[in-house]
């Protein structure tokens, strides 16, 4: 399996190379040279398999010969043993025709654990095979950072620096990044938005001299391995809801477009899916694009679902590459317009987008009403991100619809208490999180300052 860049000017690479590279050197994102497909018989066989075995079947076509099947099986079993339920991503039947897929049973109570626990093991495996080290820099709007720090905190080959927007993540999210004491993990509060943090990470990747000096790698969903690991749970759902009438629809809370693009990949691989529903909060760039054909940035509005307080949806570039018939020149033009003008017109790609996705933006009052109503009618307490997807499912879902629950409500205690009057308790094992000492840096939204911080803490750069 070889990988190509969405911008068409970087060399083809194998899985190992794109795992460590993250972003392509032409600024694009890597995608497989061709889409592997799974036969209906293989998909049907998943009904008898646990989550880790389904993951191996889904992921192995993308790793090719770079990772042996035995090693991939071992890493998948190890990764998913860190979850607090043997089902890994259990299903909760909310009412007829509506099922919740709980993705928050990992060590940081968010869906990012599903990919990050495996990604850390894959990176350590490849680095050990090559006798190398790497420096990971990531941006987070809340959950990616904690998941990355938790996954890599015991790594002997990786140093991790996570950038988060100061004051724009929940206290629980922040503390999952700032309380670990291992010397290879570092949290940085940036005076800016998530989009600023994401731009800083891309700026470091595009500074090739710096990139090479610290052996820079990424764990944001710009890294293809993050996406492919998330594809697994779409197949898992179908394997457990095999008696559903017709293809499933999925309502996905998404800001960066990675989680729903994983659903798109599952569909390309042969999974019968009816509708993929983009669920946004008031930062509604994706629903506006579906509704109007214009992808246009505007200011980020802080909401009770901070992981989706985003205006630049990085993984949308991967979709544009597919929607345009893999025309890298079209993608380069659109991305140049985004940088220069803050947006672009989808033009001929708009009908394609509307055919592939539905989209709904939930207001803050929609979210609060949904959380209260769902709890009153079913006893189920949803976090604000999941509530966005529940709103979307109610508005445009049809047939059997699965809502992706991306975080535990206890990660957003202030929001939940304000909405319901109840303070959601953290699960067992997290008792010390809110009292442990924090350690993190606060830095300006300045690429040079961030690069100096990263370089000073990179064992690769210092030769240690």
Image (cartoon, rainbow, N blue to C red):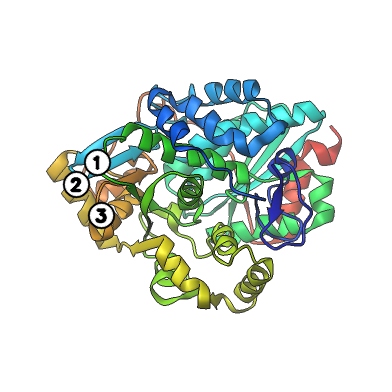
Which comes before the other along the chain, label 2 or label 3?
2
445 sits to left or right of 84: right
**Few, some or many residues within 10 Å of mark 1 (<14, 14–19, 20+):** many
Residue 318 picture location, percent across and down: 58, 58
Task: Classify residue 196 as left or right of residue 300.
Answer: right
Disc on the earlier residue, 3 or 1: 1
Residue depicted at x 29% and y 46%: 246
Q: Circle 1 sits on which residue?
A: 381
Numbered disc in front, either 2 or 3? 3
Figure check: 116 above or below 29: above
Disc 1 versus disc 2: distance between alpha carbons?
A: 7 Å
User: Which numbered disc covers residue 398?
Assistant: 3
Disc on the earlier residue, 1 or 2: 2
For label 3, the SS is loop
Query: Residue 434: where, in percent of width, then height?
Result: 42, 34
Measured in 3D between alpha carbons, the distance from the residue under mark 3 to the one under mark 1, in whole angstroms, is: 23 Å
Asked if residue 199 is positioned above or below residue 126 in the image, the reply reads below
- Image quarter (top left, top right, bottom left or bottom right) of the C terminus: top right
Residue 182, located in which quarter of the rendered image?
top right
In the foreground, 18 or 384: 18
State the mark number for residue 374: 2
Q: Report if residue 14 is visible in the image.
A: yes
From the viewer's side, name the closer residue of 110 and 51. Answer: 51
């Amino acid at each position: 399996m070889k990988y190509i860049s969405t911008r068409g000017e970087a060399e083809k690479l194998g899985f190992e190379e794109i795992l460590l590279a993250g972003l392509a050197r032409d600024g694009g994102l890597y995608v497989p040279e061709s889409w592997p497909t799974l036969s209906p018989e293989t998909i049907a066989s998943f009904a008898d398999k646990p989550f880790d075995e389904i993951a191996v079947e889904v992921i192995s076509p993308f790793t090719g010969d770079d990772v042996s099947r035995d090693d991939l099986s071992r890493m998948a079993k190890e990764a998913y043993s860190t979850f607090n339920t043997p089902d890994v991503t259990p299903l909760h039947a909310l009412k007829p025709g509506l099922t919740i897929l709980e993705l928050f049973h990992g060590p940081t109570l968010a869906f990012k654990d599903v990919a990050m626990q495996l990604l850390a093991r894959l990176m350590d495996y490849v680095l050990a095979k090559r006798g190398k080290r790497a420096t990971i820099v990531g941006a987070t709007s809340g959950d990616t950072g904690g998941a990355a720090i938790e996954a890599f905190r015991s790594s002997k080959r990786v140093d991790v620096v996570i950038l988060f927007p100061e004051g724009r993540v929940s206290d629980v999210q922040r503390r999952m990044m700032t309380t670990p004491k291992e010397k290879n993990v570092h949290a940085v509060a940036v005076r800016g938005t998530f989009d600023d943090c994401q731009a800083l990470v891309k700026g470091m990747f595009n500074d090739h001299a710096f990139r090479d000096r610290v052996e820079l790698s990424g764990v944001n969903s710009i890294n293809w391995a993050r996406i492919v690991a998330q594809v697994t749970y779409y197949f898992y759902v179908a394997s457990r809801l095999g008696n559903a009438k017709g293809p499933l629809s999925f309502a996905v809370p998404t800001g960066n477009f990675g989680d729903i693009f994983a659903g798109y990949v599952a569909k390309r691989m042969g999974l019968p899916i009816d509708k993929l529903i983009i669920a946004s909060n008031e930062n509604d760039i994706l629903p506006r694009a579906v509704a109007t054909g214009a992808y246009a940035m505007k200011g980020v509005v802080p909401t009770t679902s901070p992981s989706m307080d985003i205006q630049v949806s990085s993984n949308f570039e991967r979709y544009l590459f597919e929607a345009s018939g893999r025309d890298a020149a079209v993608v380069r033009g659109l991305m140049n317009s985004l940088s220069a003008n803050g947006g672009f017109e989808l033009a001929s790609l708009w009908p394609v987008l509307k055919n592939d996705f539905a989209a709904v933006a939930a207001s803050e009052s929609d979210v609060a009403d949904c959380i209260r109503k769902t709890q009153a009618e079913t006893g189920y307490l949803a976090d604000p991100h999941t509530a966005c997807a529940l709103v979307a499912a109610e508005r445009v879902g049809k047939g059997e619809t699965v809502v992706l629950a991306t975080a535990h409500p206890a990660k957003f205690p202030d929001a939940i208490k304000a909405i319901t009057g109840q303070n959601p308790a953290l699960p067992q094992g997290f008792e010390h999180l809110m009292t442990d000492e924090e350690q993190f840096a606060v830095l300006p939204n300045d690429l040079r300052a961030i690069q100096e911080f990263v370089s000073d803490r990179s064992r690769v750069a210092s030769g240690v």
